[in-house]
Amino acid sequence: MPSQKTQKIDLSTEYPCPCRRRGSLVPITLTEAFGCDRCQQIFVVEESGYTIEQLSTSYPTKKAWRWTGHRWIIARAGIGESYLPVALLIVLSPLILWLPLALRYAPKPNIIWILVPLLLMVLLALWTWLAYRRY
């Protein structure tokens, strides 16, 4: 089994792309960065020399990887890696607040007071999942 120990990134070596398995990272001349020949992403080597970070990204937090000598491992998981807890929080917290209020203060508790907020929360969770999913 290959070691999980991270190795320092050599700026003159080609590496496989961490986000696309078929691409390869090619060093960009006169910089401390790599460019993927397949997905056109740019990755910058951090000051320590052990981590690369995706430069242009649509994620709220930047993704970073470490090189083990054989493959990339995620150094910092962004919020995109944990969209399920975020979606559950969006669905459950308003639902927990809305349901007791709807059952207590509604003139006549009927199913519409429960289904409408539930469907809205599911729609918000779906939007969250679509916004933060991996491509």
Image (cartoon, rainbow, N blue to C red):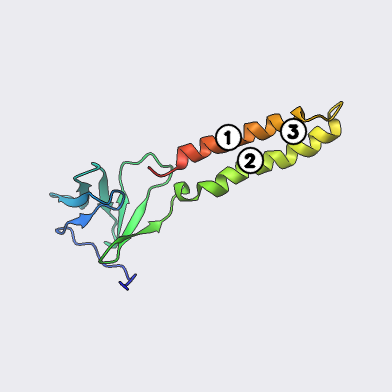
User: Mark number for residue 114?
Assistant: 3
What's the residue at 58%, 33% (across, down)? 123
Mark nearest the camera among 3 and 2 is 3
**Is the residue under label 2 in contact with that under label 3 (CB below 8 Å)?**
no
Mark nearest the camera among 1 and 3 is 3
Residue that extends furthest to the top in the rendered view of this protein: 107
Cα distance between the residues tagged 1 and 2 = 7 Å
**Which callout, 3 or 2, points at the residue further toward the start of the chain?**
2
- Location of mark 2 (residue): 91
**Which callout, 1 or 3, points at the residue further toward the start of the chain?**
3
Q: Quadrant of residue 66?
A: bottom left
What's the residue at 38%, 39% (across, down)? 58
SS assignment at label 1:
helix
Q: Quadrant of residue 102?
A: top right
Report the amino acid beneath label 1: Leu
> Which corner quadrant holds the N terminus?
bottom left
Residue 107 percent location from the top left of the image: 87, 26
115 or 134, nearer to the observer: 115
**Which callout, 1 or 2, points at the residue further toward the start of the chain?**
2
SS assignment at label 3:
helix
- Location of mark 1 (residue): 124
Left or right of residue 4, residue 102 in this image: right
Placement of 28 over or under 129, stated as above or below: below
Left or right of residue 71, residue 25 in this image: left
What's the residue at 17%, 51% (across, down)? 26
